Every structure is written in structure tokens, then in C-alpha cells.
Image: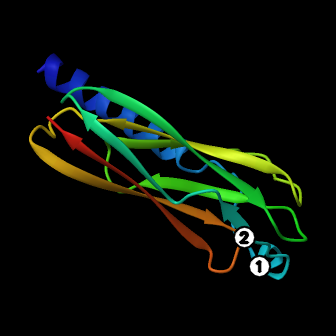
Amino acid sequence: MYRRIYVLVVLVISLSVSLGSCSKKENIITADLIENSTSINFEKDFIDLGRLTSGEIVTCSFKFKNTGKHDLIISAVTGNCGCTIADFPREPILPNQEGQITVRYDSDGSAGIRITKEVSVLSNTSPATTKLRISADVN
């Protein structure tokens, strides 16, 4: 009986913590940002990671430049699965300034296949979403 109550309490606390973390307000695309849209130029939008051993974790970077006249605001960078995680600048990138998006790929569970993973970059550009890709042969 006490165990069920304990599990229920832990579940309720976990749920409230996770819901609270989703309400963070970061850089969000608004009408104002759309009016002040800019352009982004990536040095490359595809990186071949070559041959990997299953379980290997690798990182790569996509370098970019704000080639527009307004500040570049990157709102989100998301991978198409949990094995691909990206880190990106949270502060505005001024015109003619450069930055990079670092992508971390965990090849665990991908043995014997060629993978292609996609990372979506949401920003105040037109179009608002830019797709970056990585690929590798996992042994």
C-alpha cells in the first residue's frame, strides 16, 4: 500500500517538474522576427562521418555565417532521433558574424547499416527551417 502511494507521489512530482521545464521561454519566432528576417549561409549542409564502430560517439560542427542585415536568432535545433543531439548558439548572431552548430551522434544500436540523420535548424530566416545532414557506415 505504502509502495503504491510512494510511486504515485514520485510520478506526480516528476510530471510537474517536466511540465515546468517545458514552459521555458527561449528565443521564439514571432511576427517581429519574421519582419526582421535575415539569411544564413552554412559552409556545408552535409557531413560524411565515414566508418564508425557501433557504440562510438562522434561530434561534428556545421559552421555558418549570418549573411543578412538583421540579427540571426536560432530558436531550436532538433535531430530526427534521440541518437542525434545538437548544441547551438543561444544568443543572437550579428550580421556578418559567424557561429557553429555542433552535432553529437551516438552510433549504439546501428551496427551493419549506413545511417543518414537529419538536424533541423529553426531560425528567423526564409525559409525558417534549414536541414543539415550527417551520414556514416556503422560496423
Q: Residue at x 76, y 57 (%)?
A: 65
Find disc 2 in the rendering and name its residue: 124
User: Label 1 amino acid?
Assistant: Ile
Image quarter of residue 96 = bottom right
| Residue 89 seen anywhere in this rendered image of the structure | yes
Q: Residue at x 78, y 49 (%)?
A: 98
Q: Residue 3: percent from the left, percent from the top?
A: 15, 18
Q: In the rendered view, tell whether residue 20 sits above or below residue 125.
A: above
Pointer 2 local density, CA inside 10 Å: few below 14, some 14–19, many at least 20: many
Q: Residue at x 19, y 39 (%)?
A: 138
Q: Are marks 2 and 1 in contact (CB under 8 Å)?
A: yes
Find disc 1 in the rendering and name its residue: 34
Q: Residue 70: percent from the left, percent from the top?
A: 89, 68
- Pick whichever, 119 or 46, lies toward us: 46
Earlier in the chain: of badge 2 and badge 1, it is: 1
The furthest residue to the front: 50
| In this rendering, position of residue 28 left or right of residue 10 | right
- Pick whichever, 72 or 114, lies toward us: 114
* Mark 2 vs mark 1, CA separation in Å: 6 Å
